Image (spheres, rainbow, N blue to C red):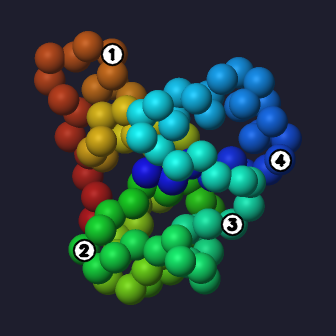
Amino acid sequence: MLVVPGSMKVKKQAEEEGLDAVFTEAGAEWRSAGCSMCLGMNPDQLAPGQRCASTSNRNFEGRQGKGGRTHLVSPPVAAATAVRGTLSSPEDLRGSSTPTTLQFA
């Protein structure tokens, strides 16, 4: 899992709150603010068959890697997905005995 803050301001605040440690202790790579997989023009790309929950603001086929699948999601869905390791809804973190079914085309 890659965590790339959207700006230096967001990165600084997250680090002040200790969120960088939370993510790295969970096995994520804490990156510098800027473009990463959202642009797909560097080594940070999906491999064929991989899926990504992204909070970026646009998507098109192959944007994050040829053969990969990107799901544009809200920050709460991205957070729930990161915690659970599978595409999830925030409701899934609230102790519901029935997992939420998310529809992805």
Label 3 Cα crowd, 10 Å radius (few <14 / some 14-19 / many 20+) = some
Q: Amino acid at mark 1?
A: Arg
Q: Earlier in the sequence, mark 1 or mark 2?
A: 2
Q: Amino acid at mark 4?
A: Met
Q: Earlier in the sequence, mark 1 or mark 3?
A: 3
For residue 77, say whether it is visible. Answer: no
User: Residue furthest toward the right?
Assistant: 9
Q: Residue at x 43, y 51 (%)?
A: 1
Q: Position of residue 97 (x, y in %)?
A: 15, 17
4 up-or-down from 11: above or below:
below
Which type of secondary structure does the marked residue at label 1 adopt? loop
Label ID, residue 8? 4
Q: Earlier in the sequence, mark 4 or mark 2?
A: 4
> Could you say which is closer to the camera, residue 27 or residue 8?
27
Is 60 placed left or right of 38 in the picture? left
Which type of secondary structure does the marked residue at label 4 adopt? helix
- The residue pinned by badge 1 equals 94
